[in-house]
Image: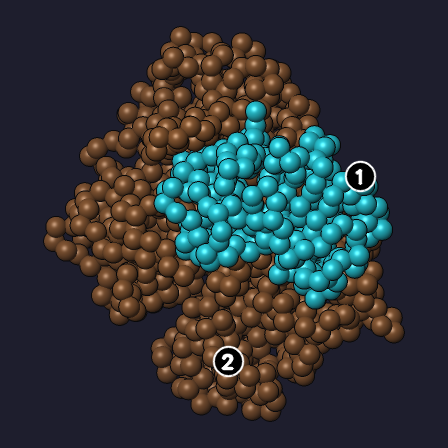
Amino acid sequence: MAALPPRFASWFESHDWQPHPHQLEMLARAEEPASLLIAPTGGGKTLAGFLPSLVELADGAHEGLHTLYISPLKALAADIRRNLRRPVEEMGLPVRIEDRTGDTSASARKRQRADPPHILLTTPESLALLISYEDAPRIFAGLTRVVVDEIHALAESKRGDQLMLALSRLQALAPGLRRVGLSATVEDPPALAHQLARHPDPCPVILADPGPLPDIAMLNTAAPPPWAGGGAAHALPEVLEEVRKHRTTLIFHNTRAQAEIFFHNLWLANEEGLPIAIHHGSLAREQRQKVEAAMVSGELRAIVCTGTLDLGIDWGDVDLIIQIGGPKNIKRLVQRIGRANHRYNAPSKARLVPANRFEVLECRAALEAVAAHDLDGEPRGPGPRDVLCQHILIRACAGPFDETELFGEVKSVGAYSNLSRAAFDDCLDFCATGGYALKAYDRWQKLMQRDGRWTLRDPRAAQRVRMNIGTIQDTELLKVRLRGRGGKPLGEIEEGFAATLTEGDTFLIGGEIVRYEGLKEMTVQVSRSGNKTPKIAVFGGTKFSASTRLTERILELIHGDWSALPHHVQEWLALQRNASQLPRGDRLLVESFPHDSRAHTCLYGFAGRNAQQTLGLLVTRRMEELGLDPLGFVATDYATLIWGLEPVEDPDPLLAPQVLRDALEGWLAKNAVMKRTFRASATIAGLIERNLPQNRKSGRQATFSSDILYDTLLKYDPDHLLMRITREEAMKGLVDFGRVEEMLARVAGRIDHMQLDRVTPMAAPLLLEVGKVPVAGKGRERLAEEEAEALMAKVGLEG
Amino acid sequence: MNAHSFTLAGCRLEARPSGALWLPDARLLCVSDLHLGKSERMARRGGALLPPYETEETLARLEAELAALMPRSVVCLGDSFDDLGAALALPEDMQLRLQAMQAGRRWIWIEGNHDPGPLELGGEHKAELAEEGLVFRHIASPRPEAGEVSGHYHPKHRLPRSGTSRPAFVYDQRRLILPAFGAYTGGLRCSTPVLRGLFSARAIAVLTGPRALAVPLE
């Protein structure tokens, strides 16, 4: 173990602190080309990452940039800058620390490029922008260390792939560069290390003491949870009681809409006026900053929030985490629990609140998984090629490049270490000529070769590439403001939702009920409304699918020991066993029954919401072909319920794997979900430019829907690179056909079809679910015609 | 019948599901805003390299209309090409397809804001055309004579409850605006003031799609 230099040792002593063993080990391993530290929150993780940098910089000899720190959040970069200031100032170290994010002023950014600080704190997107500049070799020439914070969060998404590609570029500019990753608990540290390190460098994993087991349990409520829904209104009294008993509580929700509804109800019940705030990604930045400041100064007793508070920022006094709704993912739950109690060696405390009966099973299964240290996670798979295309364009912005050198750099990224030369050439060809079967852009190539090196044909294109950097998919959002001059910004809603509003409609945002007044210059104008019940309360937010490991555990629980389950859930399961049968992991239970004069069929695939939704799309399509006239379906994490005019007599032909695969290739290829998947990849790869607010104001009919490009490629060039990427992406993510395949393999044709005379206990909650999907096709067209005729008749005209 | 029939300034008209306008008595077909060569123009200006198939797609749709209706005259209502450069760069096979469509019938190119000036692709070239009691021009005039037919705005509309927005015809007692017929064209919502302001309270939108659907604009 390395000893601390005297100056650092006496600094620790002056505070009566002991350095943690993992901090010393990070110092001892400072010369490793790469290392990964896994430590719980509050374990001095950040200092462990920076200690070697501060020691190396202490003598003041280093000129220019020494350490680059990357975090997933802008706010985290600013927070770390404040925290680092303390040791630097107290020890009098000659170290300049600055942050650089989208919020940094243009003049500061310019100065940072001319005269970089010793330690620069930034985000993956800002780094990608930095390496696109022609002076990148000069900026990064002396770079020695890079610290990637919260790497577990980055590594799950394309942001991580983009970051690692950027690091491969930095490594070429600064060959001695050493890499450090800081992570919360993950299921597979070596896989994360492989993503971080330059391939094939070794990357030792340093595990800090994980600390005591968390104190985690289900929150007991007087009223049992309802059969369906996600509001958790039944738990309001108990949640308020917990808030009262603790200093500061974070109340996590899975979606923004659920957070809004819960916050609204919590305020109505909060008779003693406890200071409680709301924080999520759709709120205006000013609103969020206000909440964050109030939190840091200890003014708040609770924050109702979503995943935006999952990471990093040191809130200090949080002593309780409440998770409303099923946790969906064991690893994320563990990481959330870690948000409570930042004192090392004190157990974190968390309470789970199932929002409906089924989620009781999910919460119970998650509790058992946490106790067993059984974390979930899907392997990431090879590096995505849309991100590679963007990287090639970014590389071209920085100046001419040699394709073999760039291929070598890309292959040094763990996720791309198996990339074939042919696959790389495909991406390069796409960037250069569009990669179409029809050679149309010989004259107007985007990249062209000059003296054997690739360069942008039109230097003006660099600006467009830089404007489109990033892999985060913003759905088209509209700002919401109070009406009147300089009206207060409240947040953002999805354009699709805004389009459904008409004057006078009310909706919830930031815990307020507002009235839609109109659209003005792409801003939604609203006024405050005294209305008690908002008419509409849906808007943006990801719906997570429950992880494979979690659904497996739920199936095990259904067949295992029920004694830890509340009485009402035991009764529910027993009723299901008597009326039909209980679903099992190695068989597929299918129930058919009449209800409300419609034929219903329920498929218990336990494949997660997205896969069950895809299953619904594919099966109803097949049903239409067979003349079963399906009318709609609804999907949850564990089942798909379909209703239609004709009963299903035999489910086997609907579920034959080849039939479903053909439908994916043929029919689903034309579906809106595939189009959304395409839009994301086409935007990342640079085919579609981001719909930036400034473009949209002037855009008028200049921009057209990416769906048109998708339809065109499907018809004229179905094997185009972006179509291949889209099909690959369809296996995971929104379409998640990979999990449909997994489920079919697990079941291996063992389908139990129960034909019953009434709705079963397990299917009943599905009847109450929101998010019903009407089946597209002839039926829908007929409905549209009827609506049009009715509207014409109303004004006295005939269609 | 999947088209929507109506009259404007005494002339019988059909709004086709494809977005084309048909005058059955004169056997005249009118399409607007083809924007041929859009992808080439964007690439030339250093923008995205869009799939270069939109000219083929737009011409295929037009050929289908010609085959179904066998018009005596075809009026292209402006912005037929994304710019003059795009017209000049039209691939030879596309030129041949266009010539085949022009054979044996009258073909009129109306000037648009994207494609002013004469074209060397056959047919007549006009700023406006008066025919059948109607006036065909690219951009609607502020105070039109009765019976004005124009394009330019790429109107789109969506039914309040069902479905996404679709390219749409819009008309009232005095004028008609056609949707864009070209494959790579976006749309402007009918509720946008600049477009809404051109029509009276009794305006009708006709959505394109599998069947032309007429709805009151209000």
Label 1 and label 2: CA atoms lie apart by 63 Å
Count the labels in the image: 2
Res A392 → quadrant: bottom right
- Report x, y in % for residue A526: 29, 55
- Which chain does tag 2 point to? A
Horizontal relation, residue A615 to residue A294: left or right? right
Query: Residue A647 or A185: which is nearer the viewer?
Result: A647
Decide: is A237 above or below A17: above
What is the letter of the brown chain?
A
Which quarter of the image is occupied by the N terminus of chain B?
top right
Element under label 1?
loop
Depth order, front residue of B86/A199: B86
Name the residue that disc number 2 marks: A106
Q: Estimate the x, y position of residue A144 in percent, counting from the top left.
A: 64, 78
Which picture quadrant has residue A296? bottom left
Looking at the rendered structure, the kind of residue marked 2 is Ala
Is the residue under label 2 in contact with that under label 1 (CB below 8 Å)? no
Residue B39 position in % (x across, y down): 70, 55
Tell me the kind of residue under disc 1.
Answer: Gly
* Residue found at x 65% / y 39%: B29
Q: Chain of mark 1?
A: B
Q: Nearer the viewer, residue A573 or A372?
A: A573
Circle 1 residue: B104
Quadrant of the snapshot with the C terminus of chain B: top left
At label 1, counting other C-alpha atoms closer than 10 Å, the crowd grade (few under 14, some 14-19, many 20 or more) is few
Q: Specify whether disc 1 shares its chain with disc 2.
A: no
Q: Secondary structure at mark 2?
A: helix
Report the residue at 62% width, 32% height from top. B24
> Which residue appears at 55% of the width and 34% of the height?
B12
Is residue A577 shown above or below A526? above
Instruction: Identify by letter the chain in cyan.
Output: B
